[in-house]
Image (cartoon, helix red, strand yellow):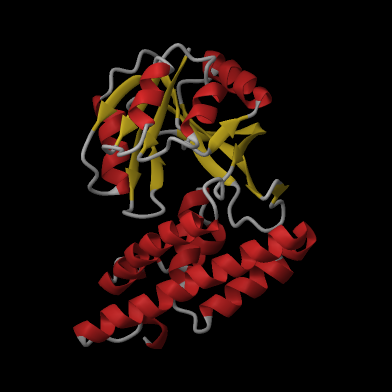
Amino acid sequence: MISVLILTRNEEKDLPGCLDSVSWSDDIHVFDSFSEDCTPEIARRFGANFVQRRFDTYAAQRNAALTTLPFRHEWIFLPDADERPTPEMMKEMQRVAAGAADQIAGYRVRRRDFLNGTWLKHAQMSPWYIRLVRRGRARYTREVNEVLDVDGAVGELASYLDHFPFSKGISYWLARHNTYSTMEARIIASGMVEQHASLRAALFAKDFHARRVAQKALFYRLPGRPLIKWIYLALLRGAILDGRAGITYANLQAIYEYMIVVKTREILGAQGAKDPQQR
């Protein structure tokens, strides 16, 4: 009834748990970016359909998987290797997939991020992600923190998707976000973000992701973004209520934002261009 697509690169630590959590599906696909660890062996041991493609960009990799793999079912579940659907979510997905109206092309789920066993209930930035889509009616855009555009209405599931972004340790998280910050800085420096800087869209856009894109575009114009982000997460959203894990997460997000800021300045300085915060 539901196919499963998992994109991987060197996911030997997280992939077994992810595959265990989706063992209810009879059509599991692992789309790999030529891992150098035991990811291929693990995928094959679990009986998943295993295909490899050279990585170019996050959006292109995901779109290649969605358009080239021989999915057996109309609905596709899209977990990352460090995500686990709860049993309640599995039952809910199967129920909605069996009875969804034709105009429904996807479902947004609420994700729970965990750090050191603590649910970052207040700290996590955005809990809503589209993870269940109809075959042929979804496409990814944007190079980093890619957005999933769905051709049709998007519903919401009530149950949770559990996410373990720190399963490989803080050092891995920092290394990955070092890469992300470079990509974000390049996007900002290119001016691509500016076209989405609409206060109206940020406040009133009907689509959740359209609001998020506009909000981020406006946020990139603000001075002192790392401090603003920390205050927003720790105090306004209440990350301090999540204890040490929440404060740690707020600190890490502020560091990530600072990396984007300094890298953007470096790129623009090399180009002789002006910082978007001063435009």
Q: Which residue is drawn at 52% across and 77% down?
A: 225
Give 245 or 197, whichever is nearer the viewer.
Answer: 245
Picture quadrant where residue 274 is located = bottom left
In this view, which residue lies farthest toward the front?
Answer: 37
Picture quadrant where residue 277 is located = bottom left
Quadrant for the C terminus, please. bottom left
Picture quadrant where residue 55 is located = top left
In this view, 251 is above or below 81: below
| Residue 220 seen in the figure | yes
Give 215 or 274, whichever is nearer the viewer.
Answer: 274
Q: Which residue is drawn at 36% across and 27% down?
A: 30
| Residue 48 seen in the figure | no
In this view, 261 is above or below 117: below
Q: Which residue is drawn at 30% across and 81% down?
A: 266
Tell me: 11 left or right of 157: left
Give 69 or 245, whichever is nearer the viewer.
Answer: 245
Could you tell me residue 133's position as x and y percent?
Answer: 44, 29
In this view, 40 is above or below 249: above
Q: Total of numbered circles in the picture?
A: 0
Could you tell me residue 143's position as x and y percent?
Answer: 31, 54
Q: Which residue is drawn at 36% across and 65% down?
A: 184
Could you tell me residue 228's position as x and y percent?
Answer: 59, 77
Tell me: 182 left or right of 257: left
Could you tell me residue 125's position as x and y percent?
Answer: 59, 57
